[in-house]
Amino acid sequence: MLHSPVPNTGCVSGWDLEYNKVIRHYHGHLSGVYALALHPTLDVLVTGGRDSVCRVSGRGTAPSLTSLESNAVSFTQLYI
């Protein structure tokens, strides 16, 4: 399960629901994360937020793979 624990922190946490603990933090946004999507077959997480940045990360231990910036829009929906 993925969750943004504190509004406007720019962090998303990955939870292990069986053991009820955080297993991974995804950092990098400067403000709130409004959207996220998991690729159905690849180990990829995409997040978008109020900072007008869309980040692509590996769901494992890999850091952010790349980011895409917009000049004027907050990302509120993502489809992959």
Image (cartoon, rainbow, N blue to C red):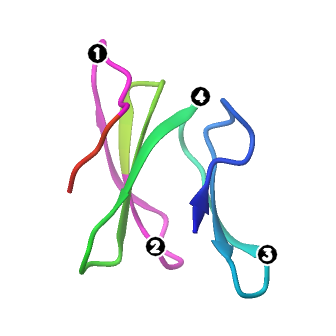
Q: Nearer the viewer, mark 2 or mark 1?
A: 2
Badge 4 element:
loop
Name which residue type carries label 2: Arg
Q: Residue at x 22, y 50 (%)?
A: 79
Asked if labels 2 and 4 touch by Cβ distance under 8 angstroms, the answer is: no
Image height check: is 65 above or below 28?
below
Find residue 53 and report its horizontal and vertical position in percent: 38, 33
Checking the image for residue 21, the label placed there is 3
Numbered label attached to residue 46: none
Residue 31, numbered label? 4
| Magenta span | 56-76
Q: CA distance from mark 3 to mark 1?
A: 36 Å
What's under tag 4, amino acid-wise?
Ser
Report the Cα–Cα distance between label 4 and label 3.
24 Å
Q: Quadrant of residue 23?
A: bottom right
Q: Is residue 67 above or below residue 13?
A: above
Q: Quadrant of residue 46?
A: bottom left
> Looking at the image, is mark 2 or mark 1 earlier in the sequence?
2
Q: CA distance from mark 2 to mark 1?
A: 27 Å
